[in-house]
Amino acid sequence: MSTHPVPATPAPAGARFGRFAPSPSGDLHVGNLRTGLLAWLFARSTGRGFLMRVEDLDRVRQGAAARQLEDLAAIGLDWDPPVVRQSERLPLYEAALARLTAAGLTYECFCTRREIQQAVTAPHGPLGAYPGTCRNLTERERRQRRDAGRPAALRLRADVTEFTVTDRLLGEYRGAVDDLVLRRGDGTPAYNLAVVVDDADQGIDQVVRGDDLLPSTPRQAYLATLLDLPVPEYAHVPLVLNPAGQRLAKRDGAVTLRDRVARGETPRQVFEALAASLGYDEVNTPSDLLERFRPETLPREPWRLDPNGLLQPCEYP
């Protein structure tokens, strides 16, 4: 089936923003703070505004969003109001779903997590991609599943299997696209839909985030083209790792700003360690760092951190 872009409201004329969009599932760890700092640097160094978005459609811990904003401010970051929360933007996502559905680009999926896992790990199936189990169900088959009480997610009917994006740091990246979930079985808009709609609606044309999210970027860029929305400029930055070379997590020890302060460090010292990890010594504030910031000189390797010792600024695998 041939697909065509679905008309949508364009971003405000002349709007140029970067953003940081954490999920309020708990306090930010040092790796999150480093990515937030980089997003701020990329935006401010290119004359863009900088926005904060709370992505609260999934797991939310009471008070976490406020603490995250406090910690970002404590290391010296600022942003342009207002702070947007996805839970307050549901009509935007429903409107996008309606446009896609009217264009014949969605279908109901009744598969359970277990069924999908079994299908995508089968030897004959494409690695990690949804195999299209429900793509061509008849109306009778869909009705039978509804009558049996099986909740239906809504999936994109993609007509490509790959899509190419250009990354500011990594160059061209071609990744897989499948029939991604747009709305979950419980009615919650899926992340891949919400982030595309939000970025376009807010005039965000620069997205800086961890390089663990790079594989999902072609799917989001492709979805943006179907909605006739602009594809942002991307920059995927290296993560922070624990001493074992694994992605830093809260279970690793003193990894949040509050943990570091409890150990006797100040927010300024944490900021200075983050700056040094990016290759900038002897800077005391984000404004000082901004004057020296050059994206092309950023380290391309992950930063390895021992959470149980002093923050070491320049340890790489």
Image: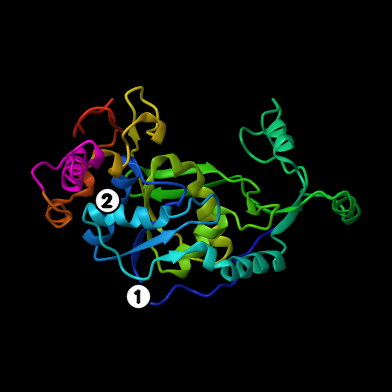
Question: In the rendered structure, which amino acid carries the disc numbered 2?
Answer: Leu
Taking the spot 68% from the left edge, 34% from the top edge, the residue there is 117
Q: Is residue 11 left or right of residue 140?
A: left
Q: Indicate the quadrant where residue 119 lies.
A: top right
Q: Is residue 79 above or below residue 186?
A: below
Taking the spot 76% from the left edge, 54% from the top edge, the residue there is 108
Q: How many tags in the picture?
A: 2
Taking the spot 69% from the left edge, 54% from the top edge, the residue there is 186
**Residue 157 pos. (x, y %):** 69, 54
Q: Earlier in the sequence, mark 1 or mark 2?
A: 1
What color scheme is it? Answer: rainbow
Q: Which residue is mark 2?
A: 37
Residue 237 at least partly seen: no
**Residue 132 pos. (x, y %):** 73, 44
For this orientation, the residue located farthest to the bottom is 13
Q: Indicate the quadrant where residue 97 lies.
A: bottom right
**Distance of mark 1 from mark 2, alpha carbons?**
24 Å
Viewer-closest of 21 and 182: 21
For this orientation, the residue located farthest to the top is 244
| Quarter of the picture holding the N terminus | bottom right
Q: Which mark is residue 14?
A: 1
The boundaries of the magenta stretch are 261-283
SS under mark 2? helix
SS under mark 1? loop
Q: Is residue 101 left or right of residue 169?
A: right
Question: In the rendered structure, which amino acid carries the disc numbered 1?
Answer: Gly
